[in-house]
Amino acid sequence: QVHVVESGGGLVQAGGSLRLSCAASTEVFRLCTVGWYRQAPGKQRELVATIRSTGNTIYPDSVKGRFTIARDNAKNTGFLQMNSLKPEDTALYYCRIVLPNGRDYWGQGTQVTVSS
């Protein structure tokens, strides 16, 4: 069992920034893929960013250029730096850890609210 804990959410004005963190209890974190997803009320969960063990990253167009995903393998922690936030970024943000064997684990989520 891998425990995943997100932190760093909050209330911010449009144009502001937040940095989310994702701590995972696995000794093979460096081999895992880290993903950030979000879900707004009434909408499906969507991918925000992923970073592979190689460091390769993927972003959807909706956040490209504004969000940056990173990882610190020494601390078993992933990060999501969110800049130029918009009201439409308001959602519950989840971290997903994918182990080398394909099993995945999700955190409970952290709320991000962007006011206009």
Image: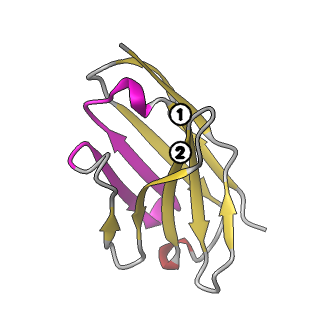
Above or below 34: residue 89 = above
Instruction: Determine the image quadrant of residue 88.
Output: top left
Distance of label 1 from label 2 (alpha carbons): 6 Å
Res. 38 mark: 2
Q: At 51% across and 52% down in the image, what residue appears?
A: 46
Q: What residue type is labelled 1?
A: Ala
Residue furthest to the left in view is 65
Image spot of residue 94 (x, y percent): 58, 48
Res. 73 mark: none
Query: On the rendered structure, is 48 left or right of 27?
Result: left
- Near mark 2 (Cα within 10 A), the count class, few <14, some 14-19 or many ≥20, is many
Image spot of residue 42 (x, y percent): 63, 35
Q: What residue type is labelled 2?
A: Arg
Above or below 10: residue 70 = below
Query: On the rendered structure, is 31 left or right of 1?
Result: left
Q: Name the residue under label 1.
A: 91
